[in-house]
Amino acid sequence: MPRERVLDRMRADSFLGVHLAVNIFVGTTLLWLLLRVAAGLNPIWAIASLVASSDPQVKQAFANFRARLLNSLFGCAVGLAVLAVGGASEWKLPFAMAAAALVSTYIVRVPTMWRQCPITAALVVASSLTRHSGMTGAELGLRRVGEIILGCLFGVVVSWLMSKVWHVPVVVKQAKA
């Protein structure tokens, strides 16, 4: 693709891609410093959540944050409820994920991130199946959910702060004929 066409596309959408890349760079750096350097933890779950929650349009970042937060909390609750009934076993993973999908689609009803609910339930249940530390599986699953929520929070906060430094106009996409 000729360079002029790429630059025209970037200008046409007010450099949204560049803005998103800067948001992700700043947020990832902050999370890495906080979790890896300061706390000695692996920041990958928080960073993945930051990316999912970030957006150059602050209104969309808040919508992503709300959707991801609700679905993560409900997924965590489903995962813990499944574990509470008889402990951990492999057959509980598909049950927890299916139950979380039902909760997400019929109770939470925020389709933006509705797949997050079964993913989070899987994290909680699977953490109890594969204990790589002295913590119990439920504790490890809860820590992962905390990392997800922290990443979501960083995503929306960085998006909001960057919007104060670098205002991005609301871009309305028109359908191509």
Image (spheres, rainbow, N blue to C red):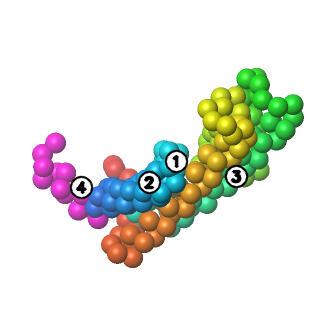
| Front-most of residues 26 and 74 | 26
First along the sequence among labels 1 and 4: 4
Q: How far apart are the alpha carbons under marks 2 and 1?
A: 8 Å
Q: Give the amino acid at mark 3.
A: Leu
Q: Would you name the residue on which mark 3 appears?
A: 73
Q: Residues within 10 Å of mark 1 (few under 14, many from 20)?
A: few
* Residue 28 image point, x, y percent: 41, 54
Residue 9 part of the magenta-drawn span: yes
Evaluate whether residue 68 shows in this view: no
Q: Quadrant of the N terminus?
A: top left
Q: Residues within 10 Å of mark 4 (few under 14, many from 20)?
A: few
Q: How far apart are the alpha carbons under marks 1 and 4?
A: 39 Å
First along the sequence among labels 4 and 3: 4
Q: Is residue 169 left or right of residue 104?
A: left
Q: Which secondary structure class fits the magenta region best?
A: helix
> Answer yes or no: do the residues labelled 2 and 3 have beta carbons within 8 Å?
no
First along the sequence among labels 2 and 3: 2
Please tell me whether mark 4 sits on a helix, a strand or a loop: helix
* Residue 123 image point, x, y percent: 64, 38
Q: Would you name the residue on which mark 4 appears?
A: 9
